[in-house]
Amino acid sequence: YSFKKEYSNDASKMREEAILHYRKSLNIYPDFFNVWFNLGKAYLTLNDLDNAYNCFLKVHEMDSTLSEATLNVALMVNSKEDIKTAEKYFERLIKISPYVLDGYNYLSYIYFNSGKFEESININKKAIQYNPSWKEPYINISQVYLHLKDTLQAQLYIQKASQLNGGK
């Protein structure tokens, strides 16, 4: 127990020290892309979400094609319950990196919770095109159909999901 606690404290101290060095690097060269990204990851591991968000947003502004930064910004905006902005980032993520399956899943939930049931079904069908062996989109579609009281379609998609091994 004490070993894990000491290790955890040491790891936190190392991350805090790394943050100081990253900040020094950015004072010298403010457009250092990799440093902004690593700084965001360091803040994220310390659960400093506001600073992590600002770093990933900076990375996204510098290169809007980096899917990991876009995903992190989308997740953080979504956690702040800024659903409209999160929706835009998840849509952008799918455009720049259609094989990042989490983007489809989160976007499906946003559409469903916003009452955009057809969009939720369609985004899940698009996810199935990229990975037909991934269960989650089939389950999501079945939940939409259940909500719409179309039990026949819901059952069809649950059966498809049950025939798969996961696929993600």
Image: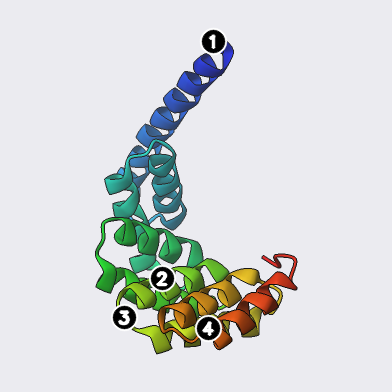
Label 1 and label 3: CA atoms lie apart by: 49 Å
Mark 3 neighbour density, 10 Å: few (under 14) some (14–19) many (20 or more): few
Instruction: Assign the N terminus to one quadrant of the image.
Output: top right
Query: Residue 56: where, in percent of width, then height?
Result: 37, 57
Label 4 with label 2: CB-CB less than 8 Å: no
Label 1 with label 4: CB-CB less than 8 Å: no
Hey, what amino acid is under mark 4?
Answer: Thr
Badge 2 or badge 3: first in the primary sequence: 2
Label 2 and label 3: CA atoms lie apart by: 10 Å
User: Mark 4 or mark 2: which is in front?
Assistant: 4
Label 1 and label 4: CA atoms lie apart by: 53 Å
What is the number of the mark on residue 109? 2
Residue at the spot of label 3: 115
Badge 4 or badge 2: first in the primary sequence: 2
Name the residue nearer the viewer: 151 or 118: 151
Describe the element under mark 4 as helix, strand or loop: helix
Hey, what amino acid is under mark 2?
Answer: Tyr
Query: Residue 122: where, in percent of width, then height?
Result: 49, 88
Describe the element under mark 1 as helix, strand or loop: helix
Badge 3 or badge 4: first in the primary sequence: 3
Name the residue nearer the viewer: 98 or 142: 142
**Which image quarter: residue 17?**
top left
Describe the element under mark 2 as helix, strand or loop: helix
Q: Residue at x 47, y 53 (%)?
A: 34
**Which image quarter: residue 3?**
top right
User: Mark 1 or mark 4: which is in front?
Assistant: 4
What is the number of the mark on residue 112? none
Residue at the spot of label 4: 151
Q: Is residue 118 visible?
A: yes
Badge 1 or badge 4: first in the primary sequence: 1
Residue at the spot of label 1: 2
